Image: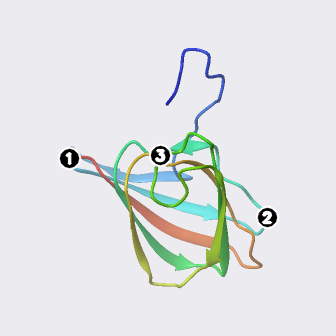
Amino acid sequence: MMTATDSREWGDIATKMLFENDRVRVWEMRLNPGEKSALHKHDHDYLMIQIEGDRMAADFEPDSEDEWNSAGGRVEGDVANGNVLFARKGGKETAINNGQEPFYEIVVELLD
């Protein structure tokens, strides 16, 4: 939970917004090998559609309230191109391309 003394700076959930209406917001996430995303939080349930890459990680904040890692820490895994993942809102994390290939995915936020 964010408090009045929370000094973290939050960024966008991905690198570029592609589309938005009253029901969905569509983003692209592009990270070169070794590159990190901005620290971000997910206020909506969302889908991740992996397009290319080989390995990714996410460093979660200790107050992250998501199904992947609610106690903070790191989750790592191989990218499965064409794979679609669903995640519930509440995550607070930084994505890291810890692979050897550029990473590209589409993130779809479900706004309603």
The amino acid type, in three-letter code, at marker 2 is Gly
Mark number, residue 34: 2
Q: Which disc, if any, is residue 39? A: none
**Disc on the earlier residue, 3 or 2:** 2
Q: Amino acid at mark 3?
A: Glu
SS at circle 2: loop
- Give the CA distance from mark 2 to mark 1: 34 Å
Which residue is painted at 20% across and 47% down in the image? 112
Residue 1: give x, y in percent of width and height. 49, 31
Image point (74%, 76%), residue name? 99
> In the rendering, at what x and y percent does residue 33 appear?
76, 69
Q: Which residue is identified by label 3?
A: 65
Quarter of the image where one finds residue 34: bottom right
Q: Amino acid at mark 1?
A: Asp
Q: Position of residue 35 (x, y in %)?
A: 75, 59
Residue 112 is tagged as: 1
Tally of numbered discs: 3
* Camera-nearest label, 3 or 1: 3
Task: Estimate how packed mark 3 is, as few (under 14), some (14 to 19) or many (20 or more) residues with alpha carbons within 10 Å.
Answer: many
Q: Is residue 79 placed above or below 105 in the rendered structure?
A: below
- Give the spatial CA distance, label 3 vs label 2: 26 Å
Q: Nearer the viewer, mark 3 or mark 2?
A: 3
Q: Residue furthest front?
A: 71
Q: Determine the CA span between mark 3 and mark 1.
A: 19 Å
Residue at the far top: name it: 4
Question: Residue 37, relative to residue 32: is it above or below?
Answer: above
Say if mark 3 contacts mark 1, CB within 8 Å: no
**x, y percentage for residue 51?**
51, 78
Q: Secondary structure at mark 1?
A: loop
